[in-house]
Image (cartoon, helix red, strand yellow):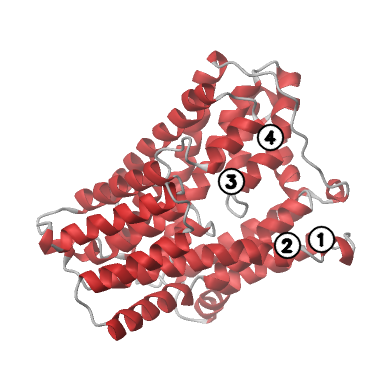
Amino acid sequence: MELLILGVVVLFIIIATVKFKMHPIFSLTIAAVASGFLLGIAPQEIMSTMAEGFGKTLSGIGLVIAFGTVIGIYLEKTGSTQILANSILKVIGLKRSPLAINLAGFVISIPVYCDSGYIILSSLNRAISKKTGIPALVFAIALATGLYSAHVFVPPTPGPLAAAAILDADLGTVLILGLLVAVPVSISGYVWARFIGKTLNEEEHKEQVVEKSELGATIKPYRAFLPLLVPIVLIAMNSIVNYPTRPLGEGWVFFTFDFIGSPVIALLVGVIFAFALGSKFSSEQKKDWVPEAFRQAGSIVLITGAGGAFGAILRTMDIASIINLESSSGIGGLLIAFVIAAVLKTAQGSSTVAIITTSAIIAPLLETFGLISITEKALAVLAIGAGAMTVSHINDSYFWVVSQFSNMNVKTALRGHTLGTLIQGVIGILMILILYVLL
């Protein structure tokens, strides 16, 4: 009966999101309440369990999501994303420009939503295509797949942040291992773009025009990288100094990085560097930037909290014994997490919703799967991320952003973009399983 209840509420989330266009905040909350009643939990206990799950999930990442979104908005509004892309292009060179575009997308998608990143950088595709003679759709797919890689694997992107909170995984470990997985996944997208891009046909449409910042051209490249790289380095150092063997001792180095490397403080430092990028913009120009960032962050924070509430109700179920998973190995657990996330992603379109819902389902099973160490929990987060990028198709808003801003018809986008995300998801889970064996 409990297994049937789990199946029904997950099916409800999919149908409510896809057919009735219900916002995930409502579908996850209704699913949590319904699960509680169907499981025979007392009404007051349902509310207290949901409140505890909501609060615990957001206690560590609410401000992190908000600060990360502010960094992304400042990079976008100041034109720094263009500077980052051009800097990478200069280093790698025009001959390997599709790879440069792929890696630029990867870097930019860490603080900027992949939809926004694609809209901002798509104008570079056509310009570089004309210079190099390489078909524009090679650049389009290389950029789309590069952006998508960081979106599901690398904090402070909201999906991995939410999964880390729900699974109680160390954020720095998720970040470090996420980069190890995401870079090969991104490059696999570039390889696919070179293979398939030349066979695709571009439609003749009026070219999309994206507004660019005039003042952004005066920002030096190293300043554009600082809001992104400094928090990543600080969070990574926090995980290193807190490793059980204490590799850097327990003196002032430990206490310094233990504090400034905590995710909230690290992202706050990144926000300070982001604010510096806007120094040459007037107060009138900047007045809506932070409110816009918080509007974006608010939705993600509430979805994450609702996922935490749903997960707290599911933890009252003994799912492991119900579906007889006592003998499942760590590899089996990672594959189960991947498959559940892939099914949810393919069914309802949102990677973030797929990550949060799968995390809520998997959290009570981590001990059963033997995924209890710092590294194993981080790999579970990444396995869910790999599933949540498999696959992007017509029910995903990102699919339409890529197709419309690249002049692809639906058939072309399915061949180029959708198959590319399938390949990336498979490469991602293979990389995660390899890391599990090695670590």
CA gap, disc 1 to disc 3? Answer: 22 Å
**Residue 254 location in percent, x, y?**
50, 77
What amino acid type should be assigned to the residue bearing mark 3? Cys
**Residue 100 location in percent, x, y?**
63, 33
The crowding category of the residue bearing disc 1, from other C-alpha atoms within 10 Å (few below 14, some 14 to 19, many at least 20), is: many
Toward the viewer: 112 or 100?
112
Work out whether 349 lies above or below 270. Answer: above
Element on which disc 3 rests = helix
Left or right of 222: which side holds 36? Answer: left
Element on which disc 4 rests = helix
Residue at numbered disc 3: 114
Name the N-terminal-most of marks 1 and 4: 4
The crowding category of the residue bearing disc 3, from other C-alpha atoms within 10 Å (few below 14, some 14 to 19, many at least 20), is: many
> Is label 3 in contact with label 2 (beta carbons under 8 Å)?
no
Residue at numbered disc 1: 278
What amino acid type should be assigned to the residue bearing mark 1? Gly
Q: Nearer the viewer, mark 2 or mark 4?
A: 4
The crowding category of the residue bearing disc 4, from other C-alpha atoms within 10 Å (few below 14, some 14 to 19, many at least 20), is: many
CA gap, disc 3 to disc 2? Answer: 19 Å
Element on which disc 1 rests = loop
Q: Nearer the viewer, mark 1 or mark 3?
A: 3
> Is label 1 in contact with label 2 (beta carbons under 8 Å)?
yes
The crowding category of the residue bearing disc 2, from other C-alpha atoms within 10 Å (few below 14, some 14 to 19, many at least 20), is: many
What amino acid type should be assigned to the residue bearing mark 4? Ser
Most extreme residue toward the bottom, as rendered? 44
Q: Nearer the viewer, mark 3 or mark 2?
A: 3
Element on which disc 2 rests = helix
Q: Which mark is residue 274?
A: 2
